[in-house]
Amino acid sequence: MPHLKLFFHDACFDGTASAALFSAFYREREAGAVILPVGMQHQVGDPFAGVAIDGDDNACVDFRYAAHPRMRWWFDHHATAFQPPRLRADFEARAGDTMAFDPDAPSCAGLVARTLAARFAWTVPAALRSLTGWADTIDAAAYASAAEACSLAAPAQRLALWVGANRDPAATARYIDELSRVGLDELATAAWLRPVLDPALDRRARDREAWAARGQVAGQVVVFDLVGTDLPPPGFSAYELFPDCTYTVTLGRTTTAVKVGVGWNPWGPGPRRHHLGALCERHGGGGHAAVGGITLGADEVEAGRAAVAAIVDALADGP
Ligand SMILES: [Mn+2]
C-alpha cells in the first residue's frame, strides 16, 4: 500500500479542511493509499527540522514551504510561506501541477479545491462542497457582524472550536479522515467529538461572562487586564460584548511571557485612525495596521501595564 504523509497546519480549521479535501482527491487518484496526517505548527526557526518527510509520497497544505526533494505536493496561501525568502526560488524551479501558491486566496481549502479541479479535473464530492466556503469565511474572518463571528450555531463553527481545543494528534487524524468522507454536517453530530467539544462549549460560555465583567471601557478603547486569571484573550468576543468600542487592548500572562495585544473592531463605530503595529513597535512589539502585539518576559507585568496605559493614551488621541 502506498503511504502518503500529509503535512497540514495543525489546530486550524482551514488546515484540517485543506487536508480533508486533499485526502478525498488522493484516495480517488491512488486506490488503497494510506494517508498519514502530520500536524505542523509555526515556530522560530525551521519547523521541518527533525521532521521526516519520508512517505512514499508527501504533501503539505496550508503551511510553509519546505525545500525538500520528496515534498511533491504543496499548497499555501500565507504571505509568509517562504522563510527565508530565498526558498521561493526553489518553489519557482520545482512547482509544476502539484504545487500552488496564492497569497490572495482567503483560504487554502479553496486554493486546493480550485487547483485540483483545474489541473486534474477533480470534482469536489457533494458532501465536501460547503468546506471551501466555510474555510474562506473562518480563515479570513469574513463575517457580517461580531455576533456572527462568535456564533457557534453552524456545524463548521463548532468543529472549528473542536479543532482549536483538541490536543490529541490521533483524534485530529481521525477528524480529517472522517471529514474527507462525510463532510461538516455529519461530522458535527459525531459522538466521539463530544468529550472535547462539550467542555470547550462550556468553557467558551464561562469565558464570555468573565470577559464581559473584566472589560474596562476608556473612551473608544476597551481594556482587558487578564493577568492572574486563566482567561485567554477575548478575540472577536470583545467586539460582540463591547460593540461600541473601536479598539481593544489586552494584557495577559502565560508561563513564558507577558503579552499585550491591540486590535481594531472591524464591525465597530469608527474608522481605524492608528497603525496598531507601529504603535506596538514603540514598545518593542510589532504587527500589521489593524492588529499589533508586544511580547515581554514573564516577570514584566508592570512594563506590560505601562505599555497598555501608553497605548490607550495614544489611541484616545487624534480626531
Ligand atoms: Mn489558512
Image: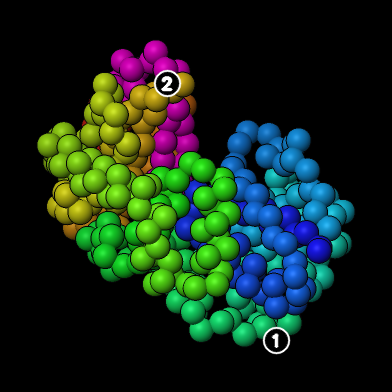
Residue 49 showing in the rendered view: yes
Q: Residue at x 69, y 60 (%)?
A: 35
Q: Is residue 15 left or right of residue 290?
A: right
Locate residue 315, reporting x and y percent: 26, 39
Residue 295 is a magenta residue? yes
Residue 317 showing in the rendered view: no
Q: What is the CA distance from the residue labelled 2 to the residue labelled 1?
A: 49 Å
Mark 1, Cα crowd under 10 Å, few <14 / some 14-19 / many 20+, is: few
Q: Residue at x 75, y 67 (%)?
A: 33
Locate residue 154, reporting x and y percent: 31, 67
Labelled disc at residue 46: none
Q: For residue 225, which quarter of the picture? A: top left
* Secondary element type, mark 1: loop
In the image shown, does 306 or 300 lie closer to the viewer?
Answer: 300
In the image shown, does 73 or 185 lie closer to the viewer?
Answer: 185
Q: Which residues are magenta?
A: 285-307
Q: For residue 306, which quarter of the picture? A: top left
Rendered position, 30 above or below 71:
below
Locate residue 1, reporting x and y percent: 81, 63
Locate residue 57, reporting x and y percent: 81, 60
Label 2 sits on residue: 255
Residue farthest to the top, as pictured: 299
Rendered position, 192 above or below 286:
below
Label 1 sits on residue: 121
Rendered position, 122 above or below 204:
below
Rendered position, 19 above or below 181:
above
Ligand 1 within 8 Å of disc 2? The answer is no
In the image shown, does 281 or 319 lie closer to the viewer?
Answer: 281
Mark 2, Cα crowd under 10 Å, few <14 / some 14-19 / many 20+, is: few
Amino acid type, callout 1: Ala
